[in-house]
Structures are given as C-alpha cells and as structure tokens.
Image: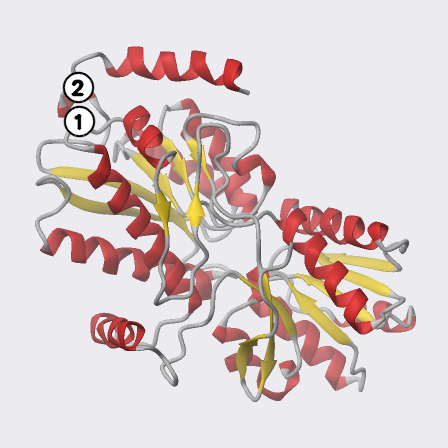
Amino acid sequence: MKCLRRPALALLAALAGTSVHAADVAGVSTQEIVVGHISDLSGPIAMLGTPVRDGMLMRFDEANAAGGVHGRKLRLAVEDAGYDPKRGVLAARKLVQRDKAFAFIATMGTPVVMATMPVVLEAGRLHLFPFSPHKATYEPLHPLKFQNFAPYQDYMEAATRHMVQAGGYRRTCLLYQDDDYGLEVMKGVETGLEKLGQTLFERTGYKRGATDLSSQIARLRAAECDLVVLATVVRETVAAMAEARRIGWKVDMLVTASGYSAQTHELGGEAVEGLYGVSVLPHPYAEGANSQLAGWIERYRARFGAAPNVWSVMGYSLADMFVRTAEATGRDLTPEAFARTLERLEFTRDYFGSPAYRFSADDHLGNRHGRLAQIRNGRWELITDYLR
C-alpha cells in the first residue's frame, strides 16, 4: 500500500508546488474556502439530505462567525442530485469546473457516490466522508479519499450474526434496494450467516424509489422468514413494515443505518414498533439530553425552525471534522496538506455520543463499528455496545 501511495502524493506535491499561494489551489482564495456537497433535496431520501445539509451549514456558520479558518470564510456549495447518479455526475462536474470546490464532503447516497467519486478524484479534489459505507470509498488506498462510516459489509455482518445468535433465527431473509447499496448489504448478511453455518433463506429486491413493496413482502412471508434484514432507506423501511403489519405478519426486521432515523418512527408510528436498526450514533432527543447537547438542539431549532435528528448531527459532525482539519493544516491549504493532517488527527464528540474517528497514512477508514438499536415506545433506544 505504501509503495502505491507515494507516487500519488508526489504528484500532488508537484502540482501544488513547493511554495503554496491561494491562487494556485482550486477553491481556496485569500478570503474563502469552497466546499462542495452533493445531496438529495428533492428525491426519495430528501428527508435525510436536508438535515445533513442544515447541520453542515450550521457548523460552517459558527466557524465563519468566529472569523473563519485562518481568516478565510467557508462557503458550502450545494447541488441537488435527487438520488440520481446521472444528475450527480452533472453536479460533480459543475462543482469542479464552475465552483472550483476545494473538497467534496458528505455526498449523499451510494449510487450517486459511486458515479461521482471518479469525477472528484480525477480532478484532484478531496473526497471526504460520503454517506455511502461502501468499501470503494476508502479502498484501495488513495491520498484524497477518506471515509468515517463503518462499511455496510462489516457492520451488517456483525449485526446479522448478533441478531441470529441472540434470537435463535433459522430463516433469515433479505429485502434489498437493487443497486450497489443493497448488494453491499447482502454481502455482509451472507458473511454473517456463513460464520454461523447458515445461508440466506430468501431474498427479494426492489428498484430505487419504489413505493409499493406488497409483492416483496408477500414473497418473504410465503418463505416463512423469521428475520428480515432491510437494505432500505427511511420511506421504504416504513413501507415494508407497514405492509407486513397490514397483512398480520409480525416478523422481526433489522434495518441498516440508512433507516435509523427519527423520521422512521415519526412516519411509521405503531407499524414500526420493535424495528431493529444499526446506529452510527444516538439520536439527539431533547428529553434526557446532557447540557451541551440540549444547548446545541436549541441553537439548531432557532436556526432552522425544526428539531434536529441524527442526520443533522452527522452533517454537523462532518463539517466540524473539516473545520478542525483545515485549522490544523494551517494557512497553506492544499489537498495534500489537508490529507496529511487528517491522517494524524483523532476526533471525539462526547456530547453527541459519537465514536472516536481516527485515520492513518495506511488506513483512510475512520470507524469500523456500529451499535444495535430498537424502536421502543416511539423512539430509538440503543440495546448493544459497539459490535465487532
């Protein structure tokens, strides 16, 4: 890995030059740093994309109010891809060519990430913390790409294994979005079952954006599944559980972190009671919040006129990681210098309950673990420590 990495870093160094000037670095001027963000603000996961964007804006606003980063104000350039890979590629090209984004942060959705990441990297821009726990977002090692969300394969292998061992399930099945996201989850589920001497009993897919899952649920019920793993996002998670309950099927279901959101129980109500999910970090409920979290919740409410959710926290945290890394890098900000700084920092956010994120020169994945949660009495409750 190290041998492959050195030529890429050398190329970046040569492009940047030994004496760095703001005019020489895309997206960095004497007054401003431009950060690109490709989201879904109008498509099937807009309910996730909007709070992520708002959390990022809140953190950048705080940094700018405090004088910016070494005197430069942060500008978040946002493009809406609508969870469509083709629109995502157009958005990435615009952010590279017209906005001259210095870095891309928190691109939303695995299909969009997989389509846009090559555009970003070929342009020599940083590709940071995408909302896609896909192994391609950190492997093979590349000097400009970093991921801090545990990969689908790893955490779903651990979560499936834990659930089956604890619950004694013998007929584990899968409902999956038929794209890169769903296939990565499938690999993790199959690996977890294989370690227990079992195989995936039944599987059925749906096309991205589908709203009617009745035929898929009927198929899984006919197979007499006793645990259904959901490679779904919020809307489809609610649809799957609502349909199962409508036909009187009370099977246990486990959803990936893509369905771990307050919107799931807000939209699903009684239908989603008992749903298991993989948690990246605790949901920021105001009730029972520590003083620091309570203060942050109030500031968020004042800024956006709505209560934050776990996606708001993740957006804020990712923006905070960018701010702290840019500050630690110093005035001479280049992609290479930023990346080398990120490799030596460690991040903890105690009042959010986040895990510690740490990178190195040989490993650009900041976290490998998740926790299990369950919807109980209309809210998510953590039920395990980090799964390994």
Locate residue 51 relative to residue 135 in the image: left or right.
left
Q: Amino acid at mark 2?
A: Val
Locate residue 330 relative to residue 14 in the image: left or right.
left
Q: Can the viewer see residue 292? A: yes
**Quick one: 198 or 36, which is closer to the camera?**
198
Identify which residue is drawn at 64% across, 84% down.
273
Q: Position of residue 175 (x, y in %)?
A: 74, 61
Q: Is residue 90 above or below residue 76?
A: above
The quadrant in which residue 374 appears is bottom right
Residue of label 1: 332
Identify which residue is drawn at 72% across, 50% down.
188
Residue of label 2: 20
Residues at circles 1 and 2 in contact by the CB criterion of under 8 Å: yes
Element under label 2?
A: loop
The quadrant in which residue 349 appears is bottom left
The scheme the figure's colours follow is: secondary structure
Element under label 1?
A: loop
Q: Amino acid at mark 1?
A: Asp
Q: Is residue 145 above or below residue 373?
A: above
**Quick one: 123 or 274, which is closer to the camera?**
274
Q: Label 1 vs label 2: CA separation?
A: 6 Å
Q: Is residue 118 above or below residue 168?
A: above
Q: Can the viewer see residue 207? A: no
